[in-house]
Amino acid sequence: MTYLLLSILLLCLHFLFFACFVDAGTCAVILAANLLFTFNGIKVYRKMSLNKFSLYLFGYLLLFIFVFILSKANLLFAIFVILYSSIFNITYLLPYLIILIFSVIFVTPYWMQVFILFGAFYFFVNSIYKKTYSRFFVAMFSIGFIFLLLIFFPILYIFLQVTPQSLLSTFKNNEFQQALFNSLITSGISTVVILIFGVPLAYCFARKDFAGKRFLDNLINLPILIPQTVVGIALLVVLGPKSPVGEFMFKNCRLAVANGYLGIIAAQIFVSSPFLIRSAINAFEGIDQRLEDASRTLGASELSTFMRISLPLAGGGIFSGCILALARALSEVGSLMVIAYHPMTAPVYIYDQFIQYGLSEIQPMAVLLVISCLWAFIGLHWLRHQMIKKVK
C-alpha cells in the first residue's frame, strides 16, 4: 500500500513539475527513474542509518541541480538517477559513477578519456591505501599521477578517435604495410647488432677499471644528448655517397648506405645503443662477483664463467635493455629523414602523409603503429618472463 501511495504522489509531482519542462516521453522516463529511486530509498532508510539516507537524498539533489537544471540533459539525468539508486549500496562502484558523472557533465568533449584515467587513478589510490594505510604514499602517488596524465591522455585520446573500420582500411594500405615491415625488420636487426657488440662492452665496464673508463662511460650517453638531425648529418657525412666509405660500399658491394636499409640500421644503432648498453652494465653490476670467483676457482675459464654464470644471471636486465633499444629504434624519425628518407619506415611514412594530407588522415596510421609497438613490447616481455623462469 505504501509503494502505491508513493507512486501516485510521484505521478502527481511529475505532472505538476517535470511536465512543464520536458516532453511526455522524457517525462515518462524520468518518472520511471524516480520511482526506482524512491523504492530503493525506502530500502536504504530501513537498512541503513539516517546519515546514509540523507546522503542518498543529497546525491539526488546534486544530480537534479547539475544535470537537469544547469546542463539541461534530461535523459542523462534519468540514466544517472537509475545508476545512482542501483549502486548506492555497492560502495566500491559508487566512486566510479561519481567520476563518470563529473566527466560527462564538466569535461564533455573528453569525457571517456577522463573517466578511464581518473577511474584508474581511483583504483590505484584505493589499492595503495589498502596496502599501506598511508596518506603520505597516496599523496606522493597523486602528485606523480599528474605526470602520467600528461603522458597517457594524448595517446588515449587518439585511440578513441579512430574507428575499427578506418584501422582495417589503413592496414590494407600496401605502402603502410611496407613501411611497418621496414621498421620492424630494421629495428630488430639494429637491436641484435647492439646486443652482439654492446654486451661484451658492458661486461668489461661492469667488472674492470681502466684508464679512460669514466670518459668512455660518459661517451655511451652521447647519442641521447645529440639532436636527431645532427646524427643524420654526421652519418651522411661519413657514410654518404660522396664519402670514402659510401663510395667503397657502392662500388664493391653495390650497397647504398644513404637512402638504403644500411643507413636506416646505422641511424637506429646510433640512437638506441645507450639504452641496451646501460641496462646491461647495470645488470652485470647487480651480480654478486663472488659467484664468478667461485666458478673460476673451480677451474672454469673466463669465457665459460661469462657464458654459464654472468650472462644467464644478467639476462633479465639485458633483455629489458633490448626492449628499450627496439622501442627507440622503432620510433626514430629525425636522423632517418636526413640519411635515409627512402625506403620509408613507419614513423617517417606517417610524417610524410601528415605533410601531404593533414592530421585526420594519419590518425589511424598512428594508432596502428602504437598497437604494433605494444604487441612487440608485450611479446618481448613475455619472452623475458619465460627466460627468467628458466634461469630460476
Image (cartoon, helix red, strand yellow):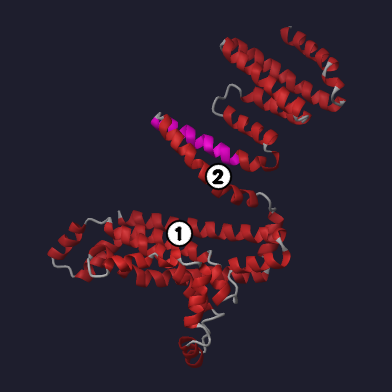
Amino acid type indicated by mark 1: Leu
Answer whether residue 128 is magenta in the image: yes
Give the image location of residue 225, x and y in percent: 44, 64
Residue at x 51% of width, y 86% of height: 255
The stretch in magenta equals 116-132
Question: As rendered, which of 22 and 5 lies closer to the eye?
Answer: 22
In which quadrant will I find the N terminus? top right
Image position of 149 with respect to 188: above or below: above
Circle 2 sits in a helix, a strand or a loop, which is it? helix
Image position of 325 with respect to 259: above or below: above
Residue 17 visible from this viewpoint: yes
Query: For mark 2, what is the residue?
Result: 149
Residue 262 visible from this viewpoint: no
Residue at x 53% of width, y 70% of height: 229
Q: Residues within 10 Å of mark 2 (few under 14, many from 20)?
A: some
Query: For mark 1, what is the residue?
Result: 380
Residue at x 86% of width, y 21% of height: 20
From the viewer's perspective, is 308 left or right of 266?
left
Q: Main secondary structure of the magenta part?
A: helix
Q: Earlier in the sequence, mark 2 or mark 1?
A: 2
Q: Quadrant of residue 205?
A: bottom left
Question: As rendered, which of 322 and 383 lies closer to the eye?
Answer: 322
Give the image location of residue 379, x and y in percent: 48, 58
Give the image location of residue 191, x and y in percent: 44, 68
- The CA span between labels 2 and 1 is 26 Å
Image position of 225 with respect to 388: above or below: below
